Image (tube, rainbow, N blue to C red):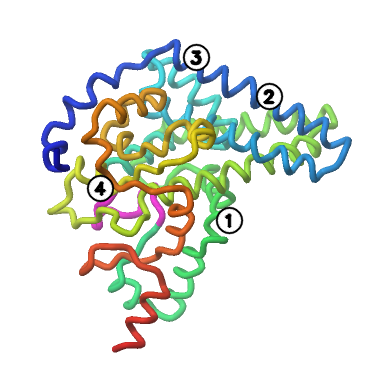
Amino acid sequence: MTTSDVTGRWRELVVKYQQPINRAAITQICTTMIPLVIGLVLMTLAMKVHYGLVLLLAIPTGGLLIRTFIVMHDCGHGSYFSSRRWNDIVGFITGVMTFTPYIQWRRDHAIHHATSGNLDKRGWGDVATLTITEYMALSPMGRFKYRIYRNSFFLLVFGPVFLVIKHRFPTPGPMTTAKERFNVHATNITLVAVAVLLGSLGALYEAAAIYLPAFMVAGSAGVWLFYVQHQFEDAYWKPAQDWDYATSALKGSSYLKLPKVIQWFTGNIGLHHVHHLSPRIPNYRLQQCHDEHPELQNVPTIGFWQGIRALGLKLYDEDARRLIGFGELRKRLANR
């Protein structure tokens, strides 16, 4: 079955999996939060031994924070629980844990789903990507800024820090609702309250020395995951008049085939083509949907190391319809 066949009947393929299973959701929360607490306790104990051990333990603990973010992510799509109220309660709590204002993020992320792969609607919840023509039209300073922004080290290290700062403020513009603004402020107040409580107990420094390394692991890995899910060589990009939702999901979202352990930590989000085809499918049902429909397996598939190499892709070539790196652009310019 071709991609065009799937895009024509995609709704009937996914409807079966859109029903949340509350027992599975609760089980996933338990298998996330209990190990997360254990990880934080072990990091606390490691502080008395050597800080290097704390940093080592930050890796699996950070993985559990990624899994926590995926819980919030699914709550934002209304897919995690059958109850909207419980989606919002758990979404807010896990949003605080990941420094993310749940309701504002929910709106911004929904726009990302509605515009992913659309060349005329870039800029919402994605990694900023210029075409070759747009890049060449920039001033030297503009090109320098773009190269810094797209630098892999900058994205993975400063990207999470930028997002934490960005999420402390309501999204500017008339689209932001009073409810979203309130949620941003409520998230900030909750974080400040936690910091004040820890400070009153004389534990603020130690808590920061433990939690922030784990958060940076989660943040850097999360930025990479989000990057590689839409930034691969043959990723689908079309102008608005030619853009198609289902085709964008299946050709513009990768199947990031990760080792099972990493897939567990990342809440199956590597099955991103299925997720973009239907955000209403909870993460704990993505694998089932993928496995039961061979036609969903004929999609761009990327392994872990391919995903690392994809960080070298920087610009979209509209003529060749693929992403290229700065090195390839330099070769082309030199051969003119």
Q: Which mark is residue 37?
A: 2
Instruction: Residue type at mark 3: give it.
Output: Ile
For discs 1 and 3, the disc positioned in front in the rendered view:
3
User: In which quadrant of the rendered view does residue 64 lie?
Assistant: top right
Badge 3 element = helix
Question: Which is closer to the viewer, label 4 or label 1?
Answer: 4
As drawn, the residue found furthest toward the right would be 48
| Residue at 57% over, 31% down | 96
Residue at horizontal 50 percent and vertical 48 percent from the top: 223
The residue range painted magenta reads: 115-127
Q: Which type of secondary structure does the marked residue at label 2 adopt?
A: helix
In the image, what residue type sits under mark 2? Val
Residue sitting nearer the eye, 137 or 183: 137
The residue mark sitting in front, 4 or 3, is 4
Please determine whether, in this image, residue 160 is positioned above or below residue 284.
below
Q: CA distance from mark 1 to mark 3?
A: 33 Å
The secondary structure type at the circle numbered 1 is helix
Q: CA distance from mark 4 to mark 1?
A: 29 Å
Residue 87 falls within the magenta-colored stretch: no
Q: Circle 4: is it few (<14), some (14-19), or many (20+) Cα within 10 Å?
A: many
Residue beneath the point at 36% across and 87% down: 334
Question: Marks 1 and 2, Cα distance to the nearest angstrom?
Answer: 26 Å
Q: Which residue is mark 4?
A: 251
- Foreground: 208 or 1? 1
**Circles 4, 2 touching at the beta carbon (< 8 Å):** no
Instruction: Point out which mark residue 146 bears.
Output: none
Left or right: where 147 falls relative to 43:
left
Residue that mark 3 sits on: 26
Q: Which mark is residue 158?
A: 1
- Ranked by sequence position, the earlier of labels 4 and 3 is 3
Mark 4 lies on a secondary structure that is helix
